Amino acid sequence: MAVKRGSFVRVIREKLDNSVEAKASDTRWSSYIFKTRGEVLETREDYALVKFGRVPTPNIWLRLDQLEEFKEG
């Protein structure tokens, strides 16, 4: 899948858990990033800015290889 602006994605837990980003952050990830649909707002090099759900949560920059297409159901 080519992640681009407007794509709907979710996070791949296994790729996020063992990443450099995880080692530099609190690893108590909110479940919504793995279960709900996120929309790619912007991409820069190997990263995408993702907005999750309809609840007021912060947008997050994630590596493209940590994302996969969101499929309903």
Image (cartoon, grey):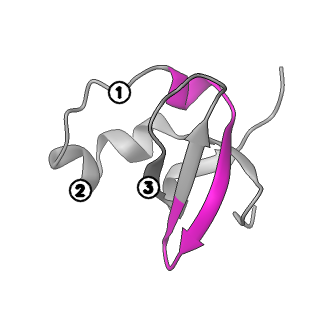
Amino acid type shown at disc 1: Trp
Q: Residue at x 45, y 55 (%)?
A: 62
View extreme (right): residue: 72
> Horizontally, is 54 left or right of 57 in the view?
right
Q: As displayed, is residue 72 above or below residue 42? A: above
- Tell me which label, 1 or 2, sits earlier in the chain: 2
Q: Secondary structure at mark 3?
A: strand
What segment is highlighted magenta in the picture? 32-48
- Can you tell which mark lies on residue 61? 3
Would you identify the image quadrant in which residue 17 lies? top left
Q: Amino acid at mark 3?
A: Trp
The residue lying at 53 percent from left, 23 percent from top is 32
Lateral position of residue 28 relative to residue 54, left or right: left
Q: Nearer the viewer, mark 1 or mark 2?
A: 1
**3D distance between C-alphas at marks 1 and 3:** 14 Å
Q: Label 1 belongs to which residue?
A: 29
Identify residue type, mark 2.
Val
Q: Quadrant of the N terminus?
A: bottom right
Label located before the other in sequence (1 or 3): 1
Q: Residue furthest bottom?
A: 45
Q: Which residue is mark 2?
A: 20
Q: Is 30 rendered above or below residue 49?
A: above
